[in-house]
Image (spheres, rainbow, N blue to C red):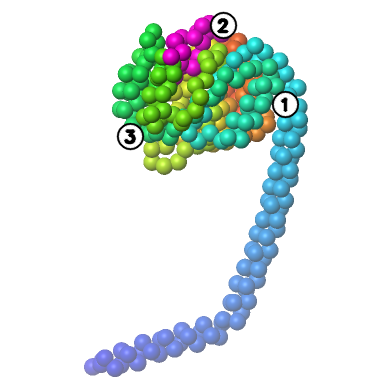
Amino acid sequence: MLTLRYHLISLVAVFLALALGVALGSTSVSQRLLSVVAGDRDSLTTQVDQLTAQHGDLEASQRAANSFAASVAPTVVAGQLAQRKVVLVLAPDADPADRDAVRALISQAGGSITGELALADAIVDPARADQIRDLTTRLLPAGAQLPSATDAGGLVGGMLGSVLLLRGQNGQPQVAADQATAALAGLTEAGFLRPGPRPSAAQLVLILTGGALTGADAPERAATMARLATELDHAGGGAVLAGRTGTADATGAVGVVRADSSNAPSLSTVDDVQSAMGRVATVLALREQAEGRAGRYGDGTNAQAAIPGASAG
């Protein structure tokens, strides 16, 4: 009869045999494995070095191109916005460096900036959408009309358009100055605008935003900003929405605008305003808007060209 002891001795013998086999063959096996691993390591190291060098070359080329674009930008845009008034609207994530650079280029193009309006983060917060709807209705200046849309971005964009923009290219202010001041003060007190001087009415509006938004509510925030920009475009003589790399993605304001075919014929967009080329595109897009045309510019896959007048790609 087989006993438990017999089973244990048999198992031990099996493991000893296996261990002996591994020990006898370990030297040759390990040498082959080390040889293969060393070869793979050398190959990967070579590939990494090559990719690093290529990346460095591309970065150097990009810096050179950006430097060249910056140097010729004043000449390219000279006179493009002569006798045009532009108001700036800054999204909560707009970069001050982009604002300063674009302001300078608009001036070099002959345009005059009537002021800027800085939006607070609360204005794109989905949790405060109902409050925005109620407030825009109560603060609407006499004589102004809200768009037929019921979303928060569209409503506040329509109201801001009546305050910030002239009627058409050479029209008059849409609302009285005191009414405009009261409307902006109400939005500021409610936390939807950052404090600042009231801009004078302009013919054109430039909305500056950042890149792609993050977080669970990113799509809603991007959509609100896109709708706000769209209604600003409808309210005056033209609008450009310009953002940084990433803004043309699904969770970026520019991406949302470009995905909606109904906005394509009217609102111009730029997706690389952090670059010199993108800033030139922004100024030329403002000129294009003043002439009743629109386009999608930048280096995003959904852009039609780098700058207005350039071939696609």
Q: Residue furthest front?
A: 178
Residue 247 tag number: none
Coordinates of residue 246 in the picture (x, y in percent): 54, 36
**Callout 2: helix, strand or loop?**
loop
**Quarter of the rendering containing residue 205:** top right
Residue 170 tag number: 2
Q: Residue at x 48, y 85 (%)?
A: 19
Q: Does residue 147 appear to the left or right of 26 in the view shown?
A: left
Q: Which residue is drawn at 65% across and 17% down?
A: 111
Residue identified by numbered label 1: 73
Residue 127 tag number: 3
Q: Residue at x 62, y 24 (%)?
A: 282
Query: Gap between marks 2 and 3, in whole Å?
Result: 38 Å
Of callouts 1 and 3, the N-terminal one: 1
Q: Which amino acid does label 2 sit on?
A: Asn
- Between 45 and 165, which is closer to the camera in this rendering? 165
Quarter of the image that includes the C terminus: top right
